[in-house]
Amino acid sequence: MAQAPQDQIAPLLTSEGWDLLASLGPYREDTSFELNSSLRKAGHSPALVSAVLTQSRLRTKAELKFGEFARSMLFTQAGLEQATRLQVAARHAERFVQAGIGHVADLGCGLAADSLALASMDITVTAVEMDETTAACATVNLIPFPNATVVHSDATSVPLDGIDGVWLDPARRVTSTSGTKRIWDPEAFSPPLSFVESLAASGRAVGVKMGPGMPHESVPADCEAQWVSVGGDVTEVTLWFNAVRRTGIRRAALLLGPQGAAEITSAEDFDGGPVAPVGPVEGYLYEPDGAVIRAGLVADVALELGGHLVDEHIAYICAPDLVDTPYARAYKVLEVMPYNVKALKAWVKDNGIGVLDIKKRGTSVTPEELRKQLLPAGKASSKGSKKAGNKTATLVLTRIGEDRVAIVVEPA
Ligand SMILES: C[S@@+](CC[C@H](N)C(=O)[O-])C[C@H]1O[C@@H](n2cnc3c(N)ncnc32)[C@H](O)[C@@H]1O
């Protein structure tokens, strides 16, 4: 049976457990069985060995979000899945620094990634967490910061006297006997959006991280909504109120990647903003970053590229020229065909295609299913096969008005 989170953490909070964890090198799945046996032979209890191996595995996994800091932090599986990446947490913290906020309460701090970023920028942090095991991990993770304190309590009832900023990352999942389930209603989050809004109404600087799929109509009127993507994956929308809201910005898309950061913003509300023209598939096809799409900034990007939408409801842009932009991936348009499986099969055969990348927007076609239909039996992988043709192609499936089309493109 899987160990409960408290049983995975408690054995580590002893000098034997802490020293043993520190003595292990990076976790390797292929040697974990042997390591388990040798630690048991050395006299450590089964509970401790299981806890150190679990923690060692989580630390290695956590390096994706926390880099080398992960090596001295404590994680639970659920806490790690929900934790903010350090790169993004640093952006959250910068807002409070720029607004001159001196003391921030992190209400529902989890493993304390956001608290850690705030504390590292010299802000006094009160990190509140109601789950006991998670609060214990947060306490360990904040040890290097004397300006941070963890409070094990319900965040909705802690006094906030003297605290001028509040950060929240509400839990968006519920755990029951049948497992963990994601929830979508902001009022079902813990704490709920109405609690966040009541804090904002008190005039404090408030930032809250929400799921990136938050519908525009649920975004409160008096905040800035900033969608964030990391390496092309949309991770969150953050709502900023009062002193941490930027003047003249209602919505934004912040793109973080190996090349650095890029941001596009709009002062207009979700139903405002520019309208892009609609035109033919030609020149270069641009696939906007998910954060741009979620923030409703596709038309803004189309105009910036000197381009047009291929359909007013679809987030594909075409422009005559190749423009270097951080907001969209560009593809050169090679051919446009009506969507027809038989004709596409013939096209695959005639062109000796063995590797087919299929993208789609605005159509219910399943790329994996279509790939199976188009490539000869046994060769339906996006990696191709020796027996199939050896050429690689990219197909974009979409809808223009009532017509379904297949666009042959190549990455530009
Ligand atoms: C999404 S996680 C926070 C992750 C955190 N930002 C991080 O990066 O590690 C939400 C946390 O809020 C806690 N939580 C939910 N409701 C709470 C409440 N009313 N009071 C205190 N903590 C709460 C949950 O136990 C969970 O650990």
Image (cartoon, helix red, strand yellow):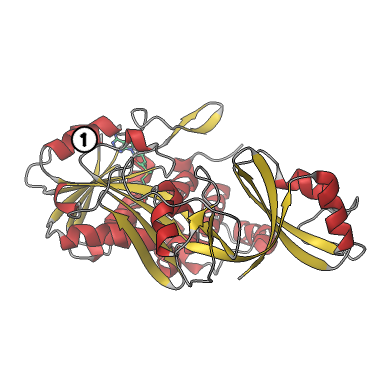
Q: Please identify the quarter of the rendering in which residue 211 is found.
A: top left
- Counting from the top left corner in percent of width and height, residue 213 is at 44, 41
Question: Along the line of sight, which residue is nearer the eye, 118 or 49?
Answer: 118
Q: Residue furthest left?
A: 162
Mark 1 Cβ inside 8 Å of ligand 1: no
Instruction: Judge from the rendering whether residue 141 lies leftward or rightward of residue 350; answer left or right.
Output: left
**In this picture, is 343 found above or below 263?**
above
Question: Along the line of sight, which residue is nearer the eye, 53 or 334?
Answer: 334
Question: Along the line of sight, which residue is nearer the eye, 46 or 169?
Answer: 169
Quarter of the image that includes the C terminus: bottom right
**In this picture, is 38 found above or below 194?**
below
Give SS at disc 1: helix
- Counting from the top left corner in percent of width and height, residue 246 is at 20, 55
In this orientation, does residue 142 appear?
A: no
Q: Quadrant of ligand 1?
A: top left
Instruction: Judge from the rendering whether residue 338 lies leftward or rightward of residue 16; answer left or right.
Output: right
* Residue that appears at 66% across and 41% down: 403
- Counting from the top left corner in percent of width and height, residue 278 is at 50, 50
Instruction: Please state the total of marks drawn on the protein image.
Output: 1
* Residue that appears at 64% across and 40% down: 363
* Residue that appears at 30% across and 32% down: 192
Instruction: Judge from the rendering whether residue 410 lies leftward or rightward of residue 128; answer left or right.
Output: right
Quarter of the image that includes the N terminus: top right
Q: Which residue is mark 1?
A: 197
Amino acid marked by disc 1 = Glu
- Counting from the top left corner in percent of width and height, residue 144 is at 27, 64
In this orientation, does residue 89 appear?
A: yes
Callout 1: few (<14), some (14-19), or many (20+) C-alpha neighbours within 10 Å?
Answer: some
* Residue that appears at 83% across and 62% down: 354
Q: Residue furthest top?
A: 177
